[in-house]
Image: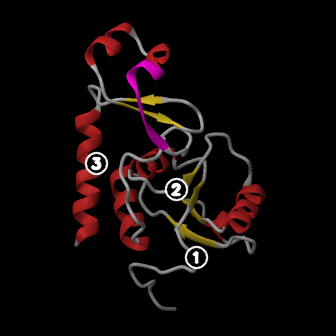
Amino acid sequence: MHPVERPQRLPGAPLRFLLDVHLGTLARRLRLLGVDAAYTNEDPGDAALAALSAEEQRVLLSRDRGLLRRREIWAGAFVYSDRPDDQLRDVLGRFAPTLAPWTRCTACNGRLMDADKNSVREHLEHGTQRTYDVFAQCTACGRVYWRGAHHARLEAIVEQALRESAT
C-alpha cells in the first residue's frame, strides 16, 4: 500500500464533492470557497449516497469507513479530523479543487449572482435595507447575501484557504 499523492488527481472536471450528514460545516465552508459540495442534513442512507456518488461522479467525503468501502462509490475520501478547520485544510490539500470564493450559496450549493437592492428588498429586514447596498442572491433557492457582521469571520476563512492553496 502506498500513500495517496497530494494533490490527488481524479478524472473529469470540475471536481465535485458529496458529503455525508456528519460534515455540514465542511460542506458550507467548501461552498463558501466556490467548490461544488452536495450535502443534506437528512441522512439518505449509505446506499443512496454511494449511488449518488457514482451517478454524478462526485467524491464522497465521510468519516464513516464502512460507507467508503461500498463498491458503487465513484471516488471517496476519509475525513480524519472532527475539527472543521482541519477538515477543510485536509480536503483542499488532498484534492486542490479550483477555488472561486463567494460564488455558491452556502445553504443549497446553488450559484450566486449579483442582485440589485430593489430586487431583493422584500427579503431584507428594515435595518439591513438601510445599512447595506451590495447584495448577491442564490439562483436556486433565492437566499440573499450581504457583507454583514459575520463577514470578517468568513473572509478570514477564505483568505486562509487562498493562502494555503497558493503554496
Q: Position of residue 99 (x, y in %)?
A: 37, 60
Q: Is residue 67 left or right of residue 166?
A: right
Which residue sits at x=34%, y=14%?
129
Kindly identify which residue carries mark 1: 12
Kindly identify which residue carries mark 3: 157
Which part of the image, by quadrant, shows the C terminus? bottom left
Element type at mark 2: loop
Across the whole image, how many numbered discs are drawn on residues?
A: 3
Amino acid type at image mark 3: Ile
- Give the mark nearest the N terminus, 1 or 2: 1
Q: Nearer the viewer, mark 2 or mark 3?
A: 2
Res. 118 mark: none
Q: Residue furthest bottom?
A: 1
Element type at mark 3: helix
Q: Position of residue 39 (x, y in %)?
A: 59, 48
Residue span colored magenta: 112-119
Kindly identify which residue carries mark 2: 36
Q: Nearer the viewer, residue 142 or 47?
A: 142
Which residue sits at x=39%, y=22%?
117
Answer whether residue 58 is magenta in the image: no
Q: Are marks 1 and 2 in contact (CB under 8 Å)?
A: no
Which residue sits at x=25%, y=43%?
155
Which residue sits at x=28%, y=21%?
132
Amino acid type at image mark 1: Gly
